[in-house]
Amino acid sequence: MKFGVVLFPSKKLQDVANSYRKRYDSHYSLIPPHLTLKEVFEATEDQIDEIAANLRKIAEETNPFTLNVTKVSSFSPANNVIYLKVEQKPELTSLYNKLHEGNLEQHLDVYSQLKLVDVAHEETVDRFHLMYQLENETWTVFETFRLGKG
């Protein structure tokens, strides 16, 4: 089964992203706006129990942190993906690293327009999610992990 680890921003920020995704993102209906913490990986049911246990430990060791979105950016020309750029924070980098230890014309036109959009946004992050992919290619939450010991 396919799994991935993501962070879902607030509804407010998801609504901003979805206002563009509805028109331009072919994956719009498959998964809500998110920040990928660990790319798609394969795991069996037995393996995912151990992975989820490790994610619980990582979540407990990670304090909530502030997520700052600073601008619209793109992976172009390597990939025609437009995204909301997130400011690197030590906590976010640490969380990402812990999750990786051990176990075209229309695009350019849209990107050039969106670069001018003010997307300054800040929110507190207190959880991340282990996702799995269904047979119809949509993604759903397998388990949610709250940051901190509380």
Image: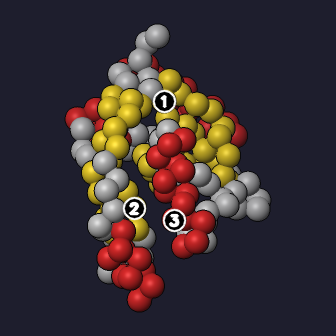
| Scheme of image coloration | secondary structure
Relative image position of residue 17 (x, y in whole percent): 49, 56
Relative image position of residue 29 (x, y in whole percent): 67, 61
Residue at 66% x, 52% y is 139
Residue at 32% x, 76% y is 112
62 or 67: nearer the viewer = 67
* Disc 1 from disc 3: Cα separation: 25 Å
Please state which amino acid type lies under the numbered disc 2.
Tyr
Judge depth for marks 1 and 3 and give the one in front.
3
Q: Secondary structure at mark 3?
A: helix
Q: Is residue 101 above or below residue 42?
A: above
Q: Residues within 10 Å of mark 3 (few under 14, many from 20)?
A: some
Q: Residues within 10 Å of mark 1 (few under 14, many from 20)?
A: some
Q: Is residue 24 above or below residue 143?
A: below
Report the disc number at residue 77. none
Relative image position of residue 113 (x, y in whole percent): 35, 74
Residue under label 2, please give it.
83
Res. 49 visible in picture:
yes
Farthest residue to the right: give it.
135
Q: Residues within 10 Å of mark 2 (few under 14, many from 20)?
A: some
Left or right: residue 133 compared with residue 34: right
Please state which amino acid type lies under the numbered disc 1.
Arg
Report the disc number at residue 20. 3
* Disc 2 from disc 1: Cα separation: 21 Å
Please state which amino acid type lies under the numbered disc 3.
Tyr
Q: Is residue 115 above or below residue 48?
A: below
Q: Secondary structure at mark 1?
A: strand
